[in-house]
Image (tube, rainbow, N blue to C red):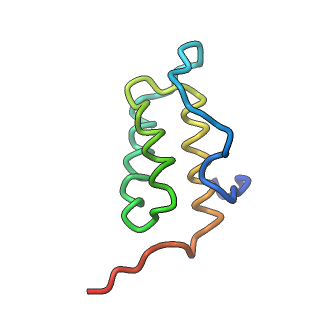
Amino acid sequence: MNEAKIMPTSMHHSSSLDKDEKGKDVSEKEYRGMIGSLLYLTASRPDIVFSVGLCARFQTSPKESHLTAVKRIFRHLIATPDVGLWYKK
């Protein structure tokens, strides 16, 4: 991911995820791990909450299109490392 193309937004404005029943299956374990990591980050990165929630719907049978959307979120995080919330005690 270090050499990945960075993304200014976490999701393309015209993209819509669906079941994609004809798409190629990907590993549920890998996909769930990625979603879990992103859900952890949503506590300090509210800009990705909607995108992560949308991708989390497809944890039972993820396809390549869903994995591509998750990878786009990670590329967005690489592009915006200084964005986040700071919670004071």
Q: Residue at x 39, y 38 (%)?
A: 32
- Furthest residue toward front: 14
Where residue 9 sits, quadrant-wise, is bottom right
Q: Residue furthest top?
A: 22
Residue 69, above or below 89: above
Above or below residue 38? Residue 43 is below
Q: Position of residue 67 (x, y in %)?
A: 55, 35
Say above or below: 71 vs 24: below
The residue that appears at 55% across and 33% down in the rendered structure is 66
The residue nearer to you, when weighing 37 against 48, is: 48
How many numbered badges does the structure rendering display?
0
* 65 relative to 13, above or below: above
Q: Quadrant of residue 53?
A: top left
User: What residue is rendered at 46% in x and 47% in y?
Assistant: 52
Q: Spot the residue most to the bottom.
A: 89
- 68 lies left or right of 19: right
Q: Position of residue 63 (x, y in %)?
A: 53, 25
Image location of residue 42, percent across then percent down: 41, 59
Q: Residue at x 48, y 72 (%)?
A: 84
The spot of residue 61 in percent (x, y) is 43, 23
**Left or right: 39 with respect to 69?**
left
In which quadrant of the rendered image does the C terminus lie?
bottom left
